[in-house]
Image: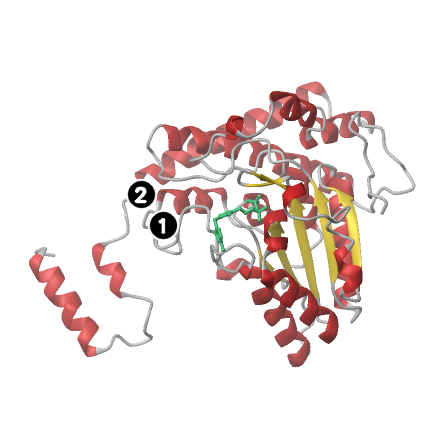
Amino acid sequence: MEMLQVVRADGEYDAKLEPNLRDEDLKKMYRYMLLVRRFNERMLLLQRQGRIGFFIESTGEEAAQVGSAFALARSDWVYESYRDPGVCLVRGVPLKTLVDQLMANADDPNKGRQMGVHWGYREWNLVSISSPVGCRLSQAVGTAYAAKFKKDNIVCVTSFGDGATSQGEFHSAMNFAGVFKVPVVFLCKNNQYAISLPVRRQTASANIAMKAEAYGFEGVLVDGNDVLASYKAMKAAVDKARSGGGPTLIEAVTYRMGGHSSSDDPSKYRSTEETELWKTRDPITRFRRYLMKKGLLTESEDRRTLEEVENELVSTIKESEKVPPPTLYSMFTDVYAEMPWHIKEEADELMGEKGQ
Ligand SMILES: Cc1ncc(C[n+]2csc(CCOP(=O)(O)OP(=O)(O)O)c2C)c(N)n1
């Protein structure tokens, strides 16, 4: 299977393959990628300083997140992964909302009830993340099936890792999607690892994309460190799904440059040579080179963008840290439209004890 690539690691590109994007959008994509990179670095530092409890980085996967999210419509539904802060940002979630989630404060729309990095925002059609690996695939297929049934013109996208393809749910979801031709796009971000387990221990297939053929639909192998290729593959898949052409499996080949989470030390299971090799394929360096070659970015604009991103992060963190935790009473709300008497009794008793 050939891998779709528009921009090479040195920034050279195939003009015949360039997607139809405005210069402004290309610049926006770059800014989002920088923001995700710096967001990851900053949040990991906050975790180390004890200012947030837990974090999952997505350094190295910025292109796959930003490129794919740019191809979606506002009305589409996304079953994103914990490694998708870029998807949330591109869909319009404010940076502060993501930081509020990690701080589990009162401004977090989910009121600190979800595990850190388990994003979910009804307003932006981002479905709250469920932790069990692979379980989002059938949820996404269900939503897409419902949309087809109701004749809603939406596409449902789910993003997951290479590890998820070893779960039974991968088979059930792919099979159902193929048989019922539902408007779903499976985006497997193959970042080479499921915690410490390398992808060669997940599958004996030459790649993951080829598995789609057995389910009766198209599989596409794409360079996930190339933001334009990631966009192009997702745009084609989404357009196809929207016009009744059924599902697509996209395998975006990328690399998890950091640890699995803030609780992981990847040096225990992979070599420095390997991480050094992938640094030469860094998605941000590559896109920067491309934009410079196209005359869309200068050194000073680049520095200014990075400064803006830094300032945005610093001021956002300050703002989020000023917000108090959710009130104790909030744990009794949002479950029932009308609070039943026994919950009210418990709430009154607790609040009375606390003198609140
Ligand atoms: C069913 C299940 N088993 C194990 C875990 C623990 N776990 C959390 S993330 C993860 C690895 C997932 O790897 P992958 O699907 O490749 O996604 P990535 O984290 O690399 O993005 C595991 C094993 C879990 N959450 N659910």
**Dot 2: what SS?**
loop
Residue drawn at the location 65% of the way across and 63% of the way down: 171
Mark 1 and mark 2 in contact? Answer it, CB < 8 Å.
yes
Q: Is mark 2 within 8 Å of ligand 1?
A: no
Q: Quarter of the image containing the C terminus? A: bottom left
Q: Can residue 315 be seen here?
A: yes
Residue drawn at the location 62% of the way across and 57% of the way down: 158
Q: Can residue 125 be seen here?
A: no
Disc 2 marks a residue whose amino acid type is Val
Where residue 347 sits: x, y (%)? 17, 66
**How many angstroms separate mark 1 from mark 2 (CA)?**
7 Å
Where residue 255 sits: x, y (%)? 65, 35
Crowd around label 2: few <14 · some 14–19 · many ≥20 (10 Å): some
Label 1 vs 2, first from the N-terminus = 1
Q: Residue furthest top?
A: 299
Disc 1 marks a residue whose amino acid type is Asp
Total marks shown come to 2
Which residue occupies the foreground of this view, 101 or 21? 101
Above-or-below relation of 345 to 265: below
Q: Which mark is residue 107?
A: 1
Q: Which residue is mark 2?
A: 323
Above-or-below relation of 174 to 39: below
Which residue occupies the foreground of this view, 85 or 2? 2
Residue drawn at the location 63% of the way across and 60% of the way down: 170
Which residue occupies the foreground of this view, 96 or 82? 82
- Left or right position of 92 against 51: right
| Model colouring | secondary structure
